[in-house]
Image (spheres, rainbow, N blue to C red):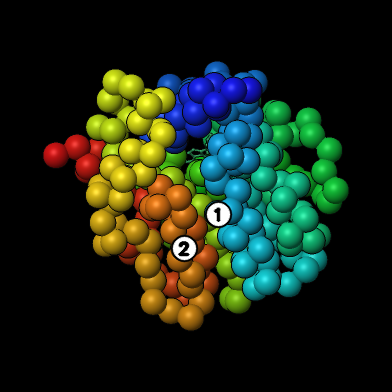
Amino acid sequence: MNTDEKNQHLLAFLHLLGRFRDEEAGIYNSIAPTYERFAIPWDAEFARPALDYLLTESAKRVPKGGRILDAGCGTGLRIPEIIEHFEPEEVVGLDLSETMLEMAGRKHYAAPVSIVHGNMHSLPFEDESFDAVVATWAVETSSNPGHAVQEFLRVIKPGGSVVFSFAQMPESFLDSEDLTQKHNGRVIENLREALSPEHLPFHACPKSDLQSFAQGLISTVILGKCCEVSSRILPKPFDEFEN
Ligand SMILES: C[S@@+](CC[C@H](N)C(=O)[O-])C[C@H]1O[C@@H](n2cnc3c(N)ncnc32)[C@H](O)[C@@H]1O
């Protein structure tokens, strides 16, 4: 893949994250067979430091042999990494899109994995039934990220962790004419201006951790059971940037 193709793939992935909410118009059902063509370069070329940090740091807080929920698991792309880092007894992958789940269900994993069709806004699980909830590039695709994170906090055990990454950027930027060119250099400067510190997640408690990567384009968040869901730990809705 040449650089231009790579950039197009990265931007297409961002576009997907920014545009559709809760499987809107069946988008994830229709793109499931090609999803990883975009997600793999995004993870490898752009998001790897954020993902490595998030999974390594959060795994230190979660006992081995636990039960981990991958919320918005999609095609199961993250599950092998979850298994590698958390060494769990079981992973549960939950998603709204049947077709994404079908693909996740076809893979072989190094630990027991259950696939569950469900909505992260009303998780079909008992309170305090997981050691950790992991959600990568999923919270920002929900129509109500605050509610989703509240649900994640509900289902973790005392001492458990909620672990998520998200990308955020202004929709007006995504809609502008020459996306490939914008990706090279200037994009980061534009984003720095658009994403002021109060729009980034923050929760001042020893159980929480916030990091910002790719100059604000990517955020990682780790929360404990005690943490509250405030707008400061959530992706900023894209359309709020428009004015
Ligand atoms: C960009 S994909 C991320 C998939 C996977 N976590 C990864 O890292 O590749 C977002 C996923 O979140 C799912 N999703 C969006 N809103 C959801 C909701 N309210 N409940 C459950 N899944 C949802 C979509 O169906 C999609 O599979």
Q: Residue furthest bottom?
A: 206
Residue toward you, 75 or 42: 42
Label 1 with label 2: CB-CB less than 8 Å: yes
Give the residue drawn at x 68%, y 72%.
60
Residue 146 % position (x, y): 38, 55
Please indicate, yes or no, whether residue 155 appears anywhere in the rendered image: no
> Residue 52 location, x and y as percent?
63, 56
Q: Secondary structure at mark 1?
A: helix
Rendered image quadrant of residue 77? top right
Residue 18 visible in the current orientation: yes
**Label 2, residues with CA under 10 Å away: few <14, some 14-19, many ≥20:** some
Residue tagged 2: 211
Q: Name the N-terminal-most of marks 1 and 2.
A: 1
How many numbered marks, from 0 up? 2
Amino acid type shown at disc 1: Ala
Foreground of the two, 28 or 179: 179
The disc at residue 137 is none
State which quarter of the image contains the C terminus: top left
Specify whether tag 2 is near ligand 1 (CB below 8 Å).
Answer: no
Q: Indicate the position of residue 38 as horizontal and vertical percent values.
A: 57, 28
Q: Is residue 203 above or below residue 149?
A: below
Quadrant of residue 204 within the rendered picture = bottom left
| Kind of residue indicated by mark 2 | Gln
Front residue (pair 193, 203): 193
Where's the N terminus, which quadrant?
top right
Number of residues whose C-alpha sits closer than 10 Å to that of mark 1, classed few (under 14), some (14–19) or many (20 or more): many
Disc 1: which residue: 50
Residue 137's place in the image compared with 180, above or below, is below
Q: Residue at x 22, y 42 (%)?
A: 241
